[in-house]
Amino acid sequence: MQIHVVQSGQSLYGIAKIYGTTVADIAEANQIDPTKTLVIGQALVIPITGRYYFVQPGDSLYKIGRRFGVPYLTLAQINAFNPEATLPVGLRLYIPPMPKTAIESNAYAEAYNGRFADRVIASVDEHALQLTYVAPFSFEAQADGSLKTIDVSPIRTAAASGGSALMMAVTNLENGAFSDSLGARILNNSDVQDRLLSNILLEAQRYGFRDIHFDFEYLRPEDREPYNAFLRKASKRLHGAGLLMSTALAPKTSAAQSGRWYTAHDYRVHGEVADFVVIMTYEWGYSAGPPMAVSPIGPVRQVLEYAKTEIPATKIMMGQNLYGYDWTLPFIRGGAYARAISPQTAIDLARQYHARIEYDSNAQAPFFYYWDASSKQHVVWFEDARSINAKFDLLKELDLRGISYWKLGLDFPQNWLLLGDRFRIGKK
């Protein structure tokens, strides 16, 4: 699979000729209208087996082979090139596909007002083959130990089409927000916990959930140990019923990191009692915050490298956003929230307003500026083939269990193409 960044003056026809494929195949792979103009800086996935590399100044077969994990003599043989000869700059070399790495994958499917939108159900159906788990979001724990449930029947049917297991996301959401007081009432009352676990088991049996996933956020710092104790209790009871148990964790870089999102999440204990964890490595750029990449590669790496010191890598799922944000400038804290958009919508915006897409090599993320019809400037940070490929590189480098997406229903076809090209997805 090739990633190509559109340059000034290029067309789908010309790009297809470079890689020996067709306009129709590129348009289908990227879900774009071939009659529309390309955006300068737009990343395209070229659906070919393997990829091509164009020789840069200072390259050698040995360096290129190391970069792509292919012996340089093999590269020479495949490309019918003398291994001792100097490589001309611009020479096109064919790089064979690398072996696929086995991982697990998860994606959340969020309900609105207790119902799943048709586009979310369709997204589950479309991508279930590439998902180990689908997590309907969410079952809300109540202060008396009951559960505010949702009808996951349409998600169950769609997930079953691709052999995805169901993950029950249990949260401390109350009136649309994570509630520390609700968490405290649950985590400090043993009887409430027992009733909650009994109700969870009933729903798990009803829908055939394979994993119970606790996403308790913004807990009080003093509830760190009560949360640990609850998870130990839950682990024993759920495992006794033949179920897996996982948790969601805030993106910490040290055990001492404090704050409403962080303190009560004890990485070491979660790593001991949970079968796996999802680390929410996104939202550095967020709707109410200043414009920046949602999941910049440097901070993501820092979190995951710390996590590996507390949790076995075989239990860590890297969180990944399937969205970006459109901020109106100037940014004013407390002002209007940025609008969440899909990567496909970002490309459409750039085309509509004749913007040029730039790429931040430090954050490993694309962005662009535009002026709207009301003469207001905007900046958009989003994800593309390059940024997701960088996360896949990190996932492989750190030898993690897998990846977990927030959330289905947002169009990002390039992610799924590259996921299938690079990984073999395990099933439960």
Image (tube, rainbow, N blue to C red):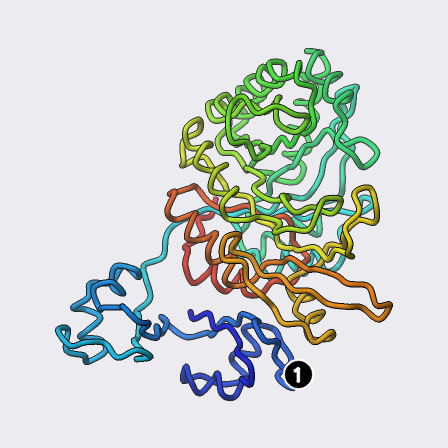
Task: Residue at 70% x, 26% y: name it.
Answer: 199
Work out whether 246 lies above or below 397: above
Work out whether 261 lies above or below 401: above
Picture coordinates of residue 222 (x, y %)?
66, 14
Secondary-structure class at tag 1: loop
Work out whether 373 lies above or below 265: below
Q: Which quadrant would the N terminus be assigned to in this image? A: bottom left
Picture coordinates of residue 124 (x, y %)?
63, 56
Task: Residue at 30% x, 78% y: name it.
Answer: 89
Given residues 382 and 321, the one toward you in this image is: 382
Given residues 172 and 307, the one toward you in this image is: 307
Given residues 214 and 406, the one toward you in this image is: 406
Work out whether 107 lies above or below 51: above
Q: Relative to 375, is 342 on the left or the right?
A: left
Task: Residue at 74% x, 23% y: name it.
Answer: 180
User: Which amino acid, by three-letter code, is at mark 1?
Assistant: Lys
Given residues 47 and 13, the one toward you in this image is: 13
Q: Residue furthest right?
A: 374
Task: Residue at 58% x, 21% y: name it.
Answer: 231
Q: Relative to 258, is 423 on the left or the right?
A: left
Residue at the disc numbered 1? 36
Residue 64 falls in which quadrant of the image?
bottom left
Picture coordinates of residue 135 (x, y %)?
63, 43
Number of marks in the image? Answer: 1
